Image (tube, coloured by chain):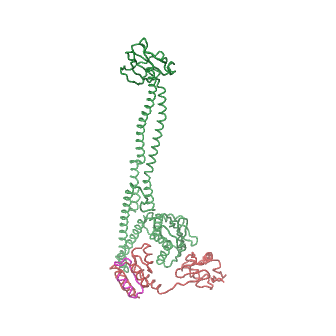
Chain colours: A red, B green
């Protein structure tokens, strides 16, 4: 894995380079925007770490130029300015993630890994049952195209049933999937969630199979 | 804490001298009306006296000339009798000469004899005042009769056939004359009084109208303080405009200085962040006492830097009248940013994509960012944003599926850290900033319970653009 770091700060740059090399990446370090842009447009990287506050050419401009040149490697932006509009500006310019200074290198490495993994594929898939759609990447659920408000638990339950569409899923299976180990496993709560999902998505979306569990299927 | 306490103290200090000055200088309008009242009174009283003199003079002259006519007729119809006395060839036509005490009299005297007089005088005699020997006509007032003021015309005449200078006198009671004068004054004085009153009222109106621009300035300044405008833009008269220009220039100067100071504070805070990162990273991976101290103190410094940055940003906000931002754009962008920070939280939004609010985009991002981050951090994993129009406002509802906040605690959470005096990070600070910023733009924030998700519902209302 080859990483480009664009960071002008004389201590932080080499520090990051050393840390990432220690984590097994091949790292190039550029110390100003002009250099960084040149390296990014000529070499092939798996990801780039870009500081926004750079001398000569600032980070947003570098990012913008890369994206215009169709350089589509994932970019993690480092910024000292952590107002929401600054974060949003980085993302809107084409960054894939951002990290506000000061940060810990462990976090940087974790975010970088996630970034590369996301870029490698993991295309979003849609689970569909009748007029209900669930986007696994964004976690968005729609009914006839309109967004539906679901709690995290309701979402997990619906998602599990959609993943096993047409099969009968037992309460125990649902409880194990939805709750943490140390949760008080009261199976009545599952009944409550199912009732709420029916209220939000339609009564016939989930069928209760007496004695066995629940089933979600395309409407006949 | 000390800085936060200082601000209201300054505000009260400033308010005190203002009240004091008001007492000392009084009202500009009152002063102008008082001056107008004085000059209107002086002019009208002076003018009234002059007019009175002219009018009474004319009436008196008219009165005198009719008497003079009678006097001439009397002189013309008199002759010296054979005994050397004056006598009238024919009696004077007016009946009043014959009626005793009628108020109209004549008398001819001279030669040391008993005066020859009209029957109306009865037993009385017109006494000549200062003796004079010329032949000119003399007119004067006489009060020789205790119950009757007289107007007397007299002339010395030497009649043909006599060496003696005869004094011819005509006298008439002033009653009729005084009546006329009183009648004129009865009209004149109320008219002048009314005129004066009218002029004073007009002067008051003039003052009110003339000082209207001052009220406009006051309103403009109030509007400015309320965040509607940044400058006084109302068209104002030539005399006031320079003052307003100066005021605007002062505002611009202050704004620039404040902006520079804020920028400075922001730059300083940001400049500290990179070295902090270096320090923390250098100290990571070692458990020595030094490394622990560095990590601990660096964490404290970071909190301080964050706190003062938030402060600088919040203080620097101004509600610009022309600012507009699309709500859905901001929600979508910020959702993405928050989603990266909290990858396990599901964020979704619903609502009209065209709704626009009168808020600067940066501030809108900050408002929504704070709300979404709170919901992601303290919620149960699902955050839902609804954008809807409500009359002249746009409502942004942020719901989560967390534990929510009990009704008793809701107000406290919003109020905690009023004006940023709370040093503690957490929901309080975030929601207090949201409330402050929303109020600067004429919006509001309310905490409720989410019906669909069971957690907290934050209702942010901002003026629609």
Taking depth in this image into account, of A182 and B29 the one nearest to the observer is B29
The relative height of residue A10 versus residue B170 in the rendered view (above or below) is below
Q: Residue furthest left?
A: A10
Q: Position of residue B134 (x, y in %)?
A: 36, 21
Q: Position of residue B182 (x, y in %)?
A: 48, 31
Q: Position of residue B379 (x, y in %)?
A: 52, 73
The relative height of residue B134 versus residue A71 in the rendered view (above or below) is above
Residue B254 occupies quadrant? bottom left
* Quarter in which the C terminus of chain A is drawn: bottom right
At x 50%, y 69%, the residue is: B356
Please tell me how many numbered marks the rendered image carries. 0
Taking depth in this image into account, of B186 and A170 the one nearest to the observer is B186
Residue A51 counted in the magenta span:
yes
Q: Is residue A173 visible?
A: no
Q: Residue furthest front?
A: B161
* Quarter in which the N terminus of chain A is drawn: bottom left
Q: Is residue B303 visible?
A: yes
The stretch in magenta equals: A34-57
Residue B135 occupies quadrant? top left
Residue B411 counted in the magenta span:
no
Horizontal relation, residue B63 to residue B294: left or right = right
Taking depth in this image into account, of B413 and B122 the one nearest to the observer is B122
Q: Position of residue B445 (x, y in %)?
A: 51, 65
Taking depth in this image into account, of B426 and B229 the one nearest to the observer is B229
Horizontal relation, residue B187 to residue A166: left or right = left
Q: Residue furthest top?
A: B83
């Amino acid at each position: 894995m080859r990483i480009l770091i664009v960071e002008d700060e004389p201590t932080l740059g080499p520090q990051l380079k050393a840390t990432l090399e220690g984590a097994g990446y091949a790292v190039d370090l550029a110390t100003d925007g002009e250099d960084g842009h040149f390296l990014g447009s000529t070499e092939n990287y798996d990801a780039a770490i870009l500081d926004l506050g750079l001398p000569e050419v600032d980070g947003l401009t570098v990012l913008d130029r890369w994206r215009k040149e169709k350089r589509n490697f994932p970019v993690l932006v480092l910024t000292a300015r952590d107002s929401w509009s600054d974060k949003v500006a980085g993302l809107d310019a084409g960054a894939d993630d951002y990290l506000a200074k000061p940060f810990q290198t462990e976090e940087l490495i974790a975010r970088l890994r996630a970034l590369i993994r996301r870029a490698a594929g993991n295309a979003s898939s849609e689970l569909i049952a009748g007029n209900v759609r669930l986007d696994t990447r964004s976690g968005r659920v729609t009914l006839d195209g309109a967004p539906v408000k679901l709690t995290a638990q309701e979402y997990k339950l619906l998602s599990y049933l959609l993943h096993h569409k047409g099969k009968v899923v037992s309460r125990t299976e649902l409880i194990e999937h939805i709750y943490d180990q140390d949760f008080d496993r009261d199976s009545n709560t599952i009944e409550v969630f199912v009732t709420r999902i029916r209220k939000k998505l339609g009564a016939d979306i989930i069928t209760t199979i007496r004695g066995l569990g629940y089933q979600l299927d395309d409407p006949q | 804490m000390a800085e936060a306490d200082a601000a209201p103290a300054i505000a009260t200090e400033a308010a005190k001298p203002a009240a004091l000055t008001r007492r000392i200088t009084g009202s500009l309008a009152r002063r102008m009306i008082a001056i107008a009242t004085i000059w209107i009174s002086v002019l009208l009283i002076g003018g009234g006296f002059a007019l009175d003199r002219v009018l009474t003079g004319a009436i008196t002259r008219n009165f005198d000339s009719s008497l003079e006519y009678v006097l001439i007729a009397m002189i013309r119809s008199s002759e010296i009798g054979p005994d050397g006395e004056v006598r009238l060839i024919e009696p004077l036509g007016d009946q009043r000469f014959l009626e005793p005490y009628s108020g109209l009299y004549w008398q001819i005297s001279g030669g040391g004899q008993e005066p020859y007089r009209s029957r109306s005088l009865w037993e009385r005699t017109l006494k000549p005042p200062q003796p004079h020997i010329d032949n000119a006509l003399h007119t004067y007032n006489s009060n020789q009769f205790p119950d009757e003021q007289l107007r007397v015309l007299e002339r010395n005449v030497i009649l043909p056939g006599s060496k003696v200078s005869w004094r011819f006198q005509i006298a008439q009671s002033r009653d009729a004359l005084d009546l006329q004068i009183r009648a004129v004054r009865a009209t004149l004085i109320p008219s002048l009084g009314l005129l004066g009153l009218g002029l004073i009222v007009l002067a008051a109106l003039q003052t009110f109208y003339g000082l209207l621009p001052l009220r406009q300035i006051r309103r403009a300044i109030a509007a400015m303080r309320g965040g509607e405008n940044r400058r006084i833009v109302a068209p104002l008269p030539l005399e006031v405009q320079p003052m307003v220009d100066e005021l605007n220039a002062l505002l611009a100067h202050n704004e620039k200085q404040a902006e520079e100071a804020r920028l400075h504070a922001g730059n300083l805070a940001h400049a500290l962040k990179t070295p902090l990162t270096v320090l923390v990273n250098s100290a990571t991976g070692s458990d020595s006492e030094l490394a622990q101290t560095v990590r601990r103190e660096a964490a404290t410094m970071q909190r301080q830097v964050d706190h003062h940055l938030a402060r600088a940003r919040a203080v620097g906000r101004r509600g610009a009248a022309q600012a507009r931002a699309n709500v859905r754009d901001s929600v979508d962008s910020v959702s993405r940013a928050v989603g990266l920070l909290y990858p396990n939280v599901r964020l979704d939004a619903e609502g009209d994509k065209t709704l626009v609010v009168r808020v600067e985009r940066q501030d809108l991002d900050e408002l929504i960012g704070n709300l979404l981050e709170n919901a992601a951090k303290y919620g149960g994993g699902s955050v839902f944003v609804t954008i809807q129009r409500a009359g002249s406002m746009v409502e942004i509802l942020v719901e989560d599926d967390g534990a929510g906040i009990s009704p008793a605690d809701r107000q406290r959470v919003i109020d905690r850290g009023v004006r940023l005096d709370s040093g503690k990070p957490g929901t309080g600070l975030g929601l207090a900033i949201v409330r402050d910023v929303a109020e600067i733009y004429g919006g509001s924030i309310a905490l409720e319970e989410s019906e669909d998700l069971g957690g907290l519902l934050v209702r942010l209302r901002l003026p629609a653009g």
